[in-house]
Amino acid sequence: MGKQLLLGNEAIGLGLIRSGCRMVTAYPGTPSSEILSSVIRYKAHAPEVVYAEWSANEKVAFETALAASWSGLRAATAMKQVGLNVAADPFFSSAYTGVVGGFVVISCDDPGPHSSQTEQDSRLLAHAAKVPVLDPSTPVEALQMTGLAFELSERFQIPVLLRPTTRLCHARQSFDSDAVLFPATAGPQARGFHKDPQRWAATPAYRLKLHVELVQKLEAIEQEFEISKLNRIQGSFGENGSAPVGVIASGVAFHTALQVLRDFGADIPVLKLGTPYPLPRRLVTDFIRRCERVIVFEEPDATIELQIPDRTRVRGRLDGTVAQAGELTPERAAAILAEALDEAGFPVPAPADERFTALVQGMALPPRRPRLCPGCSHRSAYFAIKRTFGPQAIYPGDIGCYTLGTNLRAMDTCLDMGGSVTMAAGFYHAGRLLGDERPIVATIGDSTFLHAGIVPLANAVHNDARFILVILDNHTTAMTGTQPTLASVVGTNGAAALPVSIPDLVRACGVRFVREADPYDQDPFQELLKEAHSFTRAPEGGAAVIIADRPCAIFDPTPIDAHPIPVTVTEECDGCRYCVEAFECPAIVLRPDGSRVDIDLKTCVECGQCIDACYKGFIVPQVELQHA
Amino acid sequence: MPDLQGRIVLAGVGGQGVIFASRLLAEAALAAGAQVMVSESHGMSQRGGSVAAHLIIGDEPGPLIRRGTADTLIALDRLEGLRHLPVLRPGGAVFINAVEGFPEPVRARLDELGVSACQLDADGEALRLGSPAIANVVLLGFVAAHTSLGLSLDDLKHAVRGLGPPPSVKINLSALDGGARNANDPDHGHCAQLRPSTVALEQASR
């Protein structure tokens, strides 16, 4: 392969393939999605050797891959940090049962957060589950650690968590495949599932025995981490073997610290920890003993810090030296290190000149928020919902591109995957107690419905919750890069797959009002919403489900391309901003003087949907204007 | 060029091709024998929001460039250019795709810091070349025609050929040339402090 640029997630994918991993499952979620995509790409030459699957959700993905491990194969599952919450049940349980073939759980954390609900630390969840963690700091190290994770997993028959963060997942690093050493062992010969009910189907009495085993495994792993090459000291102690300031760092924060120290010209000892759990306590304690003060740089939370037996000399997140929320940016690291070095008598460069920052801040540049794409079917659905039910209705929402429905004020809640359906039911029952009769209109995407919406819908119907659920079916998992869903006719590997029918599923949940409609047909769609509302209010009625059926304009632009409707804005436009705020298409641009809007031909996809967005009729098809 | 080094920030709006532009520079630096690390924005930020890529050339795998330490800022959008100006170190250079230059107080501050400010209507040039989507590559051609990057126009052309596919190679090569030609054209590319390299201009005319 030679020299190339490797995305962090591609590096992990390559690591899985090179390690002889035979099954990889995942549910897409930023920043983890490209791991399975690259596995699919790398395995293309030998599709029958590796089984890859975009699973319905992270729990499904986890358990599917675990069965492969119990069959003796090397297996892995990849997800984002909140996905590990969904898979927490098997994650905790599998630490007890252990594994046979190497089993690597990859959970990508998102300090920032850039595209997540939380900044939670998967390493802390692993600590709670008693699962050892490897914490890479660059794409190339992630590739190497993938192999080491399998070895560790097999030697101790335990799941291993590989925990990258956003800045690693989405960094491209130059990589010389001929120069990088890789532990290319393929794992032991798989013999298929071997029955052992006291382990694989353990009752509580045996679970206790397994827990004792697990504790012993962790003790042995800690001893191994004490001498692991993944942990090393960079930089120098003073002549007397001690240092006024030292740093303990893991993950991307290690290189952030190094960069700042290099810029400052400061040579202090840095203990790089690739194994944050279980913490090699002797190594860490010895390091701390040689420093007058130690700063811990890790993300996104205090996993290492919490395990340090004596924190008297330690500064980090727990005492607020490192901010307890938000990314550990180079600016933050620089400020912390400058103060510590200054106190220790090191020469520190003058604080960065912030006058420019102040000047730019003073200009109050308008922030650019993300918006739904031109032609997006969600925009049309939300526009119809908002036109029909106005600002008073309660709009429970969910996770996906359509979370941007908040911009259109057609989404009031966004809790977690599938939360729209359960919360709609909860709002209904709470409203009954309170005498609050506002309509409740929930929205959920197709992939999210199949991930976590089915059981909540059955539960809502069974308990006679009355609300409208609009399933925004754009035929793909759009937000994360258009991965297939269970309803796709094409599966993970590009071959034909049996599509699950969303309308049939909804009917099977007991819903009696189930309609499919194209949200592009604005008037009929609004009529349908009214009809659904009547059904939720009728004595013999119930929950109503509308499936807004229109493919994502990025994933499948053919329906728009087949019937393009170029539009123009007439001279009469008075700049009332209604379309800008209620429709918010990137292709509708308000002039800087606010006098009127124009269509930006560079971004317009000619879907024609904005014609309905101007109730004054000033946005018109181009053909109509020519005839006039 | 094993000692090629630099910290470059690319800024723009989702859909403008910030990530492609950073990829192109990274491939060129890689081919020139340097180590590279690029930090990209994915996900939510790609839906029309502000997007930035940090490109570090040389032996320091830190993911982000600290404010006040970037050598070069390449902005595909005027507003995003303004927003990201604080990344620059004194003596750095900013290249911006814009019709209108920086406001006076900003220009004064850039002068004080010895920052070279270069401006090109890359959108206009891309439109003249018949493809509005290639403004990102036009701007890179303009940047490469000045000497500040350490990567020549030929380095970038080589990278374009490597990234393919053939139809986009052709249009991207013309974009690089289009940008570079403007470096010497007082009517279009405007750069008060930096002189375009004659080598680059020769490469562009070939």
Image: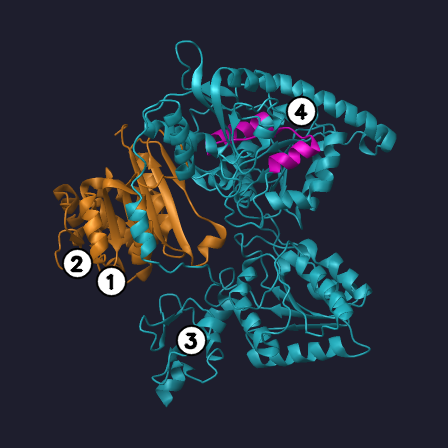
Chain colours: A cyan, B orange
Say whether mark 2 and mark 3 are on the same chain: no
Say whether mark 4 and mark 3 are on the same chain: yes
The residue carrying mark 1 is B124
Of tags 1 and 3, which is closer to the observer? 3
Say whether mark 2 and mark 4 are on the same chain: no
Say whether mark 3 and mark 1 are on the same chain: no
The residue carrying mark 2 is B188
Q: Secondary structure at mark 3?
A: loop
Examine the image and state in which quarter residue A545 appears: bottom right
Q: Position of residue B17 (x, y in %)?
A: 37, 53
| Tag 1: amino acid | Gly
Residue A1 visible (yes or no):
no
Disc 1 to disc 2, C-alpha distance: 9 Å
The residue carrying mark 3 is A577
Compare residues A491 and B20 and report the one nearer the observer.
B20
Compare residues A422 and A245 and report the one nearer the observer.
A245
Q: Secondary structure at mark 1?
A: helix
Say whether mark 4 and mark 1 are on the same chain: no
Does A287 sit left or right of B170 as displayed?
Answer: right
| Tag 4: amino acid | Glu
| Tag 3: amino acid | Arg
Kindly indicate whether the residue at mark 2 contacts the one at mark 1 (C-beta within 8 angstroms).
Answer: yes
